């Protein structure tokens, strides 16, 4: 059951991630990187070169009679290319009613190191990268109550990972509208 949920979350992230990457590319009048030649992870922290749109809530249903399933997400894209650097999708698992985060990261990562989440100056949460495909690499984790409380009260979420040269890249993602978006999906 959990693998089906992970697959559903991955499918949702893949479809919304592609739309966000396309929107970012149009907004910046730069073509997205071709899918056949995935761009490697940036070699330096890109806080100045990445833009975020804030937390966005989307609800979908498989049919008119099926219940709505809502998720919230935030996307950081490179300003020059429209390439997604980090996309975070959070949804409430229908069976457990617990929040689950799915992260899309760029290709060219040091996979054994994984990724880390840190709210403000709090403790870091380690994530194992589960799979990669032509749009990026993915990690998924249930959000524990203490992390959820930190996200709701925090100012900034830092997503960090290493590139192939073992340089740490940290992407800051604002949390100003996190609590309001989360209240809409719970």
Image: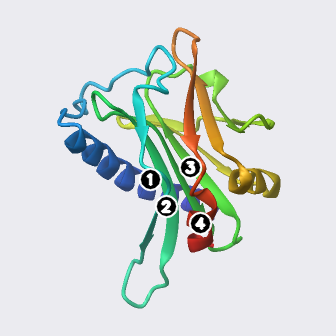
With 64 as the anchor, is 31 left or right in this view?
A: left
- Give the mark, 1 or 3, whose residue is nearer the N terminus: 1
With 104 as the anchor, is 182 left or right in this view?
A: right
**Tag 2 secondary structure:** helix
How crowded pointer 2 is (Cα within 10 Å; few <14, some 14-19, many 20+) is rated as few
Q: Nearer the viewer, mark 1 or mark 2?
A: 1
Give the residue number, with chain letter if any, for mark 2: 8
The quadrant the N terminus occupies is bottom right
Name the residue nearer the viewer: 130 or 125: 125
Name the residue nearer the viewer: 56 or 153: 153
Give the residue number, with chain letter if any, for mark 1: 13
Q: Nearer the viewer, mark 4 or mark 3?
A: 4
Q: How far separated are the C-alphas under marks 1 and 2?
A: 9 Å
The residue depicted at 63 percent of the width and 41 percent of the height is: 157
Q: How far separated are the C-alphas under marks 4 and 3?
A: 19 Å
Residue 131's place in the image compared with 18, above or below, is above
Give the residue number, with chain letter if any, for mark 3: 102
Tell me the number on the disc at residue 74.
Answer: none
**Tag 3 secondary structure:** strand
- Give the mark, 1 or 4, whose residue is nearer the N terminus: 1
Residue 76 coordinates in the image, percent (x, y): 44, 39
How crowded pointer 3 is (Cα within 10 Å; few <14, some 14-19, many 20+) is rated as many
Give the residue number, with chain letter if any, for mark 4: 180
């Amino acid at each position: 059951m959990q693998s089906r949920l992970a697959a559903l979350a991955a499918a949702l992230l893949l479809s919304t991630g592609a739309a966000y990457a396309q929107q970012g590319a149009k907004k910046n009048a730069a073509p997205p990187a071709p899918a056949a030649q995935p761009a490697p992870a940036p070699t330096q922290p890109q806080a100045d070169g990445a833009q975020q749109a804030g937390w966005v809530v989307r609800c979908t249903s498989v049919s008119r009679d099926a219940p709505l399933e809502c998720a919230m997400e935030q996307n950081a894209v490179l300003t020059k290319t429209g390439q997604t650097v980090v996309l975070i999708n959070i949804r409430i698992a229908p069976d457990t009613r617990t929040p689950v985060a799915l992260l899309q990261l760029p290709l060219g990562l040091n996979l054994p190191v994984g990724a880390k989440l840190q709210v403000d100056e709090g403790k870091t949460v380690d994530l194992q990268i589960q799979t990669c495909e032509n749009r990026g690499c993915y990690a998924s984790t249930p959000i524990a109550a203490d992390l959820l409380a930190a996200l709701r009260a925090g100012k900034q979420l830092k997503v960090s990972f290493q590139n192939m040269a073992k340089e740490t890249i940290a992407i800051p993602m604002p949390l100003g509208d996190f609590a309001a978006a989360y209240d809409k999906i719970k």
